[in-house]
Image (cartoon, grey):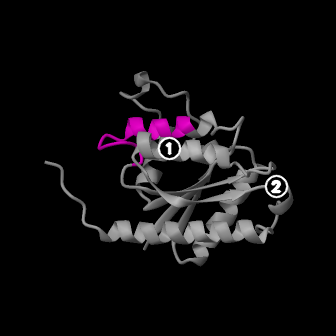
Amino acid sequence: MTSILVFSGSTRPASLNQRLADVAAQKLEGLGVTVTALSLADHALPFADDDGRADPPFAARALTTQVLEHDGLFIACPEYNSGYPALLKNALDWVSMVRKDGPGLAGKVVALGAASPGARGGYRALTQFRTMLELGFGALVIPDMASVPFANKVLPAEGGLTDEGASKFLDATLKRLVLECRRSAAVPRLESP
């Protein structure tokens, strides 16, 4: 069965992006996949540097194990000053350091979403984050991205996404994620020489 790891790039319990990740997890379960919700707050990591490569902290190894055990990822990416947060980049840098068989997200299908109180819905951070995931981490990032503008009004603390347009974008993104994960699983892997 297809398995998806869902997490937010924020550790704040009241984060709009955590709310988006929660909604995405529910919707993915409705699509018949196995979903694991992860909080980066449970993986307290120091700043990544080459000194940690030889003996990575337990939290980095645990996070990497979770990433590798899943077919795909849905990441809700906060936007800070028009960019993605250092917390999220740092966590993925550790995955790359722990993983020895290629870039940190090689072979993983990734879908992105962002929730913001602003009119652009975190889209500026998503475009930067997507480029880094593809070029730096080797991920297959699906073209669809779920951006939720005015999220403070349309993502209540309890319940789902109340904006119909944003909800349709999220649904399309998640369906494409599941489809691409299933396609990826069906393609035989080439062995390295």
Residue at image position (86%, 59%) is 153
Residue at image position (47%, 33%) is 57
Between residue 103 and residue 167, name the one nearer to us: 167
- Write down the residue under mark 1: 131
Can see residue 38? no
Between residue 98 and residue 111, name the one nearer to us: 111
- Could you tell me residue 169's position as x and y percent? 65, 67
Span highlighted in magenta in the image: 89-105
Between residue 28 and residue 127, name the one nearer to us: 127
Can see residue 192? yes
- Could you tell me residue 51's position as x and y percent? 41, 21
Instruction: Place residue 112 in its image quadrant.
Output: bottom right
| In this picture, residue 100 sits left or right of residue 148 | left
- Could you tell me residue 181's position as x and y percent? 43, 66
For mark 1, does the 10 Å Cα neighbourhood hold few (<14), some (14 to 19), or many (20 or more) residues?
Answer: some
| In this picture, residue 23 sits left or right of residue 158 | left
